[in-house]
Image (tube, rainbow, N blue to C red):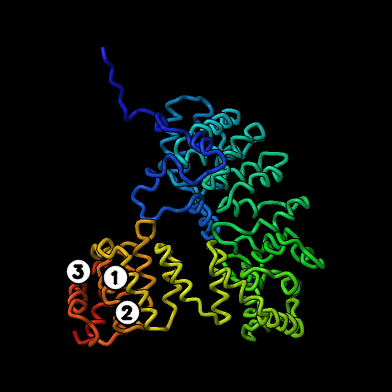
Amino acid sequence: MVIFFDRAKRPLWEGRPSIYSHIQGQGDSVDGSLPDDEEFWSGNKIRWVAGGLDGAFGHHAGPATMTDEARELVHLLAKQSRNPKNSIRKALYAKLVKTDIGGMMDEVIDEVRKHPGIQPDSVFLEAKWLAEHGAHRNAVKFGIALLGLFENGQVKELLLTLGSHEEFTLYAVVAIHNGMEDSNQVLFELAEQVHGWGKINIVERLEPASQEIKDWLLRHGCRNNVMNEYLACTCARNGGLREALSADQVDSALLNGATDIIEALLNGGPAEDMDDYEHAPQVLLDYVRLIRENGTTAQHLSVIFSIYDFLAEDEEKWAVRMSAGWSGQLRSDISDACGSIMADTKWMSIVMDAVSSVDSPDRYYGVACAEKLGMDIWDTLYNQLEANPLQDFYYYQLMKSDDRDRIRRFVQFATGHLPLQHIATGPGSEMGFGEEYAAHRKLGAILQSLDRFEGIGAELILTGLNSPVTSNRNMAIEALEGWDVSSWSEQLVHAVTHLSGIEPEDPVKERLHKLCEAKGL
């Protein structure tokens, strides 16, 4: 006799790899993927990087409020703690998978603390089970968060493993901080394994309890894969940047780490910036002194340019700064020192080497400094593009030229190398994120400057008008707004009038109608 089981009643975790085992299997190369990716992101045009959704919400959203769904979760957890059953676990797990509690986890945990029917020992076991065996991220996050209610040193390896994946670092950090005696040292151990939102969440909570931690904060703590600006002021304060840079000489790792911190503070936002940092005057004075003696990279020079620009900002800003530790003499002295550094001829070869580097960050700083120094690097970049035609960076940089012959040459190259038929699939409402739209982004980098070069790039404009990416169509229209209609081909006239009738986005359609009216079509 064959018995058929109802698959709909099988537990959602059954037959799936646990997230814990998935991360374990990746060893030291945790790549951000998770077994529930396709299910979790189904129907979303944008996939956040690991930890990005929780990180952005935590840094920029307002306070959360409890929902009925979240209260039902706590009710099920209490029920399971009093009388553990697989049927209740299935119901709790299914509710977790469907409920977005990331932004209200603190409120949910407070509700757990207050619930009169909770049995702590059973809750700990359920939390450990969810964290260890959960195959869906929301269930694992809930399990980790619950572990933070207990002394949890016995599950240190579990929390460190899960925390090494950026999607769970925030939850592991809170659990470790709340539940381990040596939590700060454990967090420091974890901090060296993560590089994105996870690193941000750790460094913001890491106490500078030892010289080893302070040294790490100044040398390696600020740089991350999201935005250095999130951590710059924290690292400067907690690492003791003012004291460290006051030395006569510093090691190269400290100088480079300070460069990252100062660059981010000068950039400003979304966190505290140079005007929020109480030791800014002394730190900038010492940094400029050290770079004058030991500066060797294009990034060093780039930050000197940024300091010089900061010092030259309008007097309204400086009126406020003068009451915050600055003086006119100090401002003038640092500005003069920056000018002397920028005038040193040694930078020409350093910058050119950086422009020619295979390392993307070095090349970025080299190009930025070359622009400031008035160096002509267009041919160098064009030759690099020919060797590697898929780099977005070159498309933006090469279009900065004002030379029509150079732009014509580049446009011809792009016309021959971009998959124009693949791009021109018809108007849509796509935002253009993700690898599948890499070619569309390269096209956009060209289109956004073609209004300055009438008659050049008509085929690319036609492609842009037929792109599913809304920004491509907007940029193609912008280019034609800058051209006299006498330079339009019949194809362009037909494409614009046709698109005005089928354009799916109302703002773009209105812009097309205005274009047709302005050009007498």
What separation in Å lies between label 3 and label 2 (alpha carbons)? 20 Å
Amino acid type, label 2: Ala
Q: For mark 1, what is the residue?
A: 464
Circle 2 packing at 10 Å, graded few (<14), some (14-19), many (20+), is many
Cα–Cα gap, marks 1 and 2 = 10 Å
Residue 321 in view here: no
Q: From the image, state whether disc 3 or disc 2 is nearer to you.
A: 2
The tag earlier along the polypeptide, 3 or 2, is 2
Circle 1 packing at 10 Å, graded few (<14), some (14-19), many (20+), is many
Res. 431 visible in picture: yes
Q: Nearer the viewer, residue 178 or 244?
A: 244
Q: Is residue 10 above or below residue 449?
A: above
* Residue 479, label in figure: 2
* Contact? badges 1 and 2 (CB < 8 Å): yes
Q: Position of residue 153 (x, y in %)?
A: 67, 34
- For this view, does 408 lie left or right of residue 148? left
Q: Along the horizontal axis of the image, is 374 left or right of 281? A: left
Answer left or right for 400 relative to 459.
Answer: right
Residue that protrudes farthest toward the top in the picture: 1
Residue 502 disc label? 3
Q: CA distance from mark 1 to mark 3?
A: 15 Å
Residue located at (67% from left, 44% from top): 189
Displayed quadrant of residue 24: top right
Q: Which quadrant, please, contains the N terminus? A: top left
For the point 61% across and 59% down, the residue is 223
Q: Which quadrant, please, contains the C terminus? A: bottom left
- Tag 1's secondary structure? helix
The amino acid type, in three-letter code, at marker 3 is Ile
